[in-house]
Image (cartoon, rainbow, N blue to C red):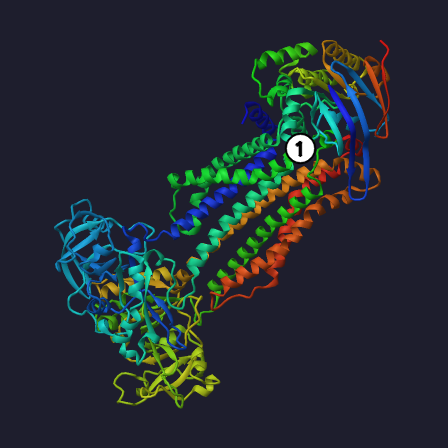
């Protein structure tokens, strides 16, 4: 499904050049649940952002189902994100002025396909157990509930790929477990998930673990079932 | 806009209600100011455009170009018989004349004369100046008929039908005319003051009718195309050379005739007067536009600053698949919607502010919605797009990965901060320039009000009703003697000049001994006994006229005998003398010799904008026999009581003509009215510009302070006091306001120096105006941001450090 070839990402400021990713080669198959781990600053989030096309690589190729995304113009990448991807962030990133239901619906706002939006939104909220808070605003929910709402937004469009950047980073143990259970359920239902995490126990839930250091993949191993 | 985007915008708006209302309020204020000042400019530039075919109608100007003459310039009056001579040389020429106009004559009803706007016009008048006929017929070819305006009909006939009725009108002579037609009153945007139209006399009404150099009426011509008018105008030089031989070999070098489109008449200055009215209209139009610009800049600045708070939302929308055009469209749509709300509020503010502007400007404007609404709709689109473009561009550029990874919203970076600072510099630069302008206008108008005119303004009344040619010299003499007998009156003097002017100006070339040529042109005036004593004129050298001295009397002098004259100080240099003392006893004037017996300080009877021209005075013991004579009355005590006593005296001595007199203060004040009106309007505009600037500054201060809470916590943890923190926060805004002076001072200096150049007696552009305005702006800026800075500086460091 996903092929990364010689992906590099360099940041150049006035005096400093930083290499966030150096020669990344990675294949991810459909239906995989991949956990990426590594110390702070190793490039985990940059790799996730590259997979999510919200950060462009400096060099290399990114093939998604055979399509080279690295060369696509911004407009087409936007379309790709709307149709194919779902994001979950550590800090939830819900929009404060919208209700939970409206935030979830935002996940369909930029898609061109029609279809029964209300039903899809309701189904997504049901799936994550947040439907009873549909009319509330984000600041009225707990952290765990907000993250579940963010997951609902990520899955409402049935994305091919879900990218989760430390989804439990701001949650307590109980809520973190709940979120991981949701991700696991989604994966069992066929979703491809790539997750960045600091938590080894959460990484164990994934089917494959990738370790990064200084912008490189230093290890990649399937997890024991 | 998608419903969800609309919803998001509405909720973001109401969540931050105060800031958003301030931003909208500031923009509404700017738009309202632009509307009101735009209405004023529209009114002032619309004079005579209500006339059908106004673009085909031209006023003939008489233009003087006499070397060293104080009266050079273009005048709106011509010789009485000019049109007749033009028709002889240019057969088929279409034109008409107006002789008289405002207070041009009197109407005699039951033996009592009342002033009225009487004008003598030609039979073709309505073909050229197409006043709308309301009833009756065009009877201006009938020497026994007249036409009156609707307001004149109401005044003299009440609710009765005036058609067929008779009215006695006096202009040159009293005659009864039959009302044949009623025309609609000219509107407010007209210089035509016409109440009663009577036929131009067939016989020449005055000796100067065909004397080149005299001006006594207005001449209008009609041409079907501008090209035809231009072609005709090019022939006028040759016409003047043929007809104006009184001016010597090359008459067209001394006097020219020009065509002025009638729509330009109102703003065109006359003679040596500066184009103050035109300049005022342009200046106020510019104030309106600049205030709108300040409001727009303000809006952009605040909208940009607030917009960055939505960076995370923008980043998420991008992550979810929104492309840049969609985001730009969304934010432009929000901007247009917000500006539309501001525009609606602006209409309300304009309606509320209109009475204030009308009072300040002496106007009677109203809001023409049929014009304002479409213009406003266009403005909403343009302003919305312009104002929304930068924030939309800024927002749509955010990289989601950078925004979402950051703990705080981006502020637009250093470039964003620099842009905001530049916008503050720009808007405060304009506001400070306005403040300087308002201060200079105030100081100059006060200076004009209080400037020494060369005589004491208090205790002086000018009686103008003697000017009417129908008042007999014996009656004038009788009035003057009776007025002198009033207990509060100390002096009464007659002359063809006086405070506020008598309505006529005389000038003559005075040849100098030993100097070839006609000599410089000086104004000349005829004065009677006690004239200079009445005014308290200050004698510099020699003496003033003495009625007991036969030699001082100018009339009846033997041929070639010198006439004694008194000159004013400007005439000393004009006549080539090094000092007033040197001029005493000297004779000038060639074959019309005049001997200088005295020099006085200038008497400023007219506008302080114009220099007092070099003038010589001649004396007669019978001033009541001169034309355009007026009386100057020096008195003690209450002006209103004295006016009342003088009126009673007039009605005893000249009962058949209306009494017309004003205090010297009143006569001089009218010269200041226009400038004071401009000053009031300008001050209103300046205040609004400052208010809008402060609204913007307050909003920016709020934004910046919120972003620096954590920094404040760190500073306080490191030992900074509240005062130290306030210095940092306030200093951030003081810097651009101080830099704004670099923009404001040159602008204001150029504008004010140009405006002051239109005054003969002007104040100096003191540095205090500039320093004062700069200091005031700084104080206002500090005052605006003080409250928020103090609140932020007092925040608990622990709380501040946890703030995001």
> Numbered disc 1: what chain?
B
Q: Percent from the top left, x then y, of residue B553?
A: 30, 84
Quadrant (top left, top right, bottom left, bottom right) of the C terminus of chain B: top right
In the picture, measured across the screen, residue B177 lies left or right of residue B262, that is: left
Q: Out of A63 and A102, give the one closest to the viewer.
A: A63
Q: Is residue B382 left or right of residue B259?
A: right
Does residue B403 sit above or below B481 in this rendering? above
Q: Nearer the viewer, residue B162 or A22?
A: A22
- Judged from the image, the secondary structure of the residue bearing numbered disc 1 is helix
Residue A147, quarter of picture: top right
- Whether residue B642 appears in this view of the structure is no
Residue B587 sits in quarter: bottom left
- The location of residue B528, given as percent across then percent down, is 31, 77
- Residue at image position (59%, 53%) is B432
Q: Tell me what residue is drawn at x 56 percent, y 53 percent.
A: B435
Q: Which residue is mark 1?
A: B309
Q: How many marks?
A: 1
Residue B311 drawn at (x, y percent)? 67, 32
Vertical side of B795 occupied by B68: above or below: below
For the N terminus of chain B, which image quadrant?
Answer: top right
In the rendered image of this protein, does residue B57 appear above or below residue B608? above
Compared to residue A100, the image places residue B86 above or below, namely below
Residue B230 visible in rendering = yes
């Amino acid at each position: 499904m996903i092929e990364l070839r010689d992906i590099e990402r360099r940041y150049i400021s006035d005096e400093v050049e930083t290499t966030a990713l150096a020669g990344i080669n990675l294949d991810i198959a459909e239906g995989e649940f991949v956990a990426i781990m590594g110390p702070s600053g190793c490039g985990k989030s940059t790799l996730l952002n590259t997979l999510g096309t919200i950060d462009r690589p400096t060099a290399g190729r990114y093939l998604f189902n055979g399509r080279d995304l690295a060369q696509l113009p911004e407009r087409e990448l936007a379309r790709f994100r709307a149709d194919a991807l779902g994001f979950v962030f550590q800090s939830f990133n819900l929009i404060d002025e919208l209700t939970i239901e409206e935030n979830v619906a935002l996940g369909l706002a930029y898609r061109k396909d029609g279809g029964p939006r209300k039903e899809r939104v309701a189904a997504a909220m049901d799936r994550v157990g947040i439907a009873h808070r549909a009319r509330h605003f984000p600041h009225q929910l707990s952290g765990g509930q907000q993250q579940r709402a963010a997951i609902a937004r990520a899955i409402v469009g049935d994305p091919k790929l879900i990218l989760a950047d430390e989804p439990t980073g701001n949650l307590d143990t109980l809520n973190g477990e709940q979120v991981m259970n949701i991700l696991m359920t989604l994966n069992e239902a066929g979703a491809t998930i790539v997750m960045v995490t600091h938590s080894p126990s959460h990484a164990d839930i994934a089917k494959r673990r990738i370790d990064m250091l200084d912008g490189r993949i230093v290890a990649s191993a399937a997890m024991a079932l | 806009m998608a419903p969800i985007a609309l919803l998001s915008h509405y909720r973001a708006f109401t969540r931050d209600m105060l800031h958003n209302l301030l931003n909208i309020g500031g923009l509404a204020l700017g738009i309202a100011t632009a509307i009101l000042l735009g209405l004023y400019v529209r009114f002032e530039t619309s004079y005579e455009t209500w006339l059908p075919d106004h673009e085909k109608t031209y006023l003939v100007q008489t233009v003087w170009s006499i070397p060293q003459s104080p009266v050079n310039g273009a005048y709106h009056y011509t010789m009485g018989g000019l049109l007749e001579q033009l028709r002889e040389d240019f057969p088929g020429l279409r034109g008409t004349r107006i002789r008289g106009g405002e207070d041009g004559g009197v109407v005699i009803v039951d033996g009592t004369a009342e002033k009225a706007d009487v004008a003598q016009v030609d039979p073709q008048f309505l073909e050229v100046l197409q006043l709308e006929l309301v009833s009756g017929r065009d009877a201006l070819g009938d020497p026994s008929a007249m036409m009156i305006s609707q307001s004149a009909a109401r005044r003299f006939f009440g609710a009765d039908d005036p058609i067929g009725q008779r009215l006695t009108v006096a202009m040159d002579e009293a005659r009864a005319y039959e009302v044949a037609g009623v025309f609609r009153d000219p509107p407010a945007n007209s210089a035509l003051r016409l109440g009663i139209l009577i036929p131009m006399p067939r016989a020449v009404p005055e000796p100067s009718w065909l004397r080149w150099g005299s001006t006594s009426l207005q001449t209008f011509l009609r041409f079907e195309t501008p090209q035809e008018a231009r072609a005709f105008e090019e022939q006028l030089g040759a016409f003047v050379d043929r007809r104006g031989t009184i001016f010597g070999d090359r008459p067209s070098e001394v006097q020219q005739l020009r065509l002025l489109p009638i729509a330009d008449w109102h703003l065109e200055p006359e003679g040596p007067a500066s184009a103050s009215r035109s300049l005022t209209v342009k200046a106020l139009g510019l104030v309106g536009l600049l205030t709108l610009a300040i409001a727009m800049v303000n809006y952009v600045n605040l909208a940009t600053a607030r917009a960055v708070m939505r960076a995370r939302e923008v980043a998420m929308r991008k992550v979810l698949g929104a492309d840049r055009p969609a985001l730009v469209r969304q934010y432009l749509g929000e901007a247009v919607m917000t500006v539309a709300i501001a525009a609606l509020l602006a209409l309300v503010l304009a309606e509320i502010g209109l009475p204030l502007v009308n009072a300040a400007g002496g106007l009677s404007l109203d809001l023409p919605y049929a014009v304002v609404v479409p213009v406003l709709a266009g403005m909403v689109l343009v302003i919305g797009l312009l104002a929304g473009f930068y924030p939309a561009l800024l927002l749509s550029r955010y990289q989601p990965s950078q925004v979402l990874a950051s703990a705080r919203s981006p502020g637009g970076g250093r470039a964003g901060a620099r842009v905001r600072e530049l916008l503050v510099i720009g808007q405060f630069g304009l506001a400070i320039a306005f403040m300087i302008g308002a201060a200079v206008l105030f100081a100059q108008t006060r200076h004009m009000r209080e400037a020494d005119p060369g005589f004491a303004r208090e205790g002086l009344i000018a009686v103008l009703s003697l000017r009417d040619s129908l008042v007999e010299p014996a009656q004038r003499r009788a009035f003057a003697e009776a007025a002198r007998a009033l207990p509060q009156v100390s002096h009464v003097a007659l002359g063809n000049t006086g405070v506020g002017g008598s309505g006529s100006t005389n000038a003559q070339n005075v040849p100098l001994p030993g100097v070839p040529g006609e000599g410089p042109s000086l104004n000349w005036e005829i004065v009677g006994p006690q004239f200079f004593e009445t005014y308290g004129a200050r004698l510099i050298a020699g003496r003033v006229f003495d009625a007991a001295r036969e030699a001082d009397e100018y009339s009846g002098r033997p041929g070639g005998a010198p006439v004694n004259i008194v000159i004013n100080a400007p005439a000393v240099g004009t006549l080539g003398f090094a000092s007033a003392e040197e001029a005493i006893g000297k004779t000038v004037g060639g074959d019309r010799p005049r001997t200088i017996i005295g020099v006085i300080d200038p008497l400023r009877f007219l506008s302080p904008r114009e220099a007092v021209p070099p003038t010589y005075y001649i004396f007669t013991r019978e001033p009541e026999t001169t034309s355009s004579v007026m009386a100057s009355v020096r008195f003690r005590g209450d002006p209103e009581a004295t006016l009342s006593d003088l009126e009673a005296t007039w009605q005893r001595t000249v009962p058949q003509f209306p009494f017309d007199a004003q205090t010297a203060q009143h006569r001089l004040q009218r010269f200041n009215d226009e400038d004071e009106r401009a000053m009031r309007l300008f001050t209103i505009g300046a205040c609004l510009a400052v208010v809008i600037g402060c609204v913007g500054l307050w909003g920016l201060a709020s934004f910046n302070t919120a972003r620096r809470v954590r920094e404040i916590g760190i500073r306080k943890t490191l030992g900074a006091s509240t005062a130290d923190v306030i210095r940092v926060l306030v200093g951030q805004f003081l810097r651009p306001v101080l830099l704004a002076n670099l923009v404001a001072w040159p602008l204001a200096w150029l504008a004010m120096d140009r405006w002051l150049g239109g005054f003969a007696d002007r104040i100096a552009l003191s540095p205090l105006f500039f320093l004062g305005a700069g200091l005031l702006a700084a104080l206002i800026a500090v005052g605006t941001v003080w409250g928020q800075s103090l609140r932020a500086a007092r925040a608990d460091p622990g709380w501040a450090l946890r703030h995001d």
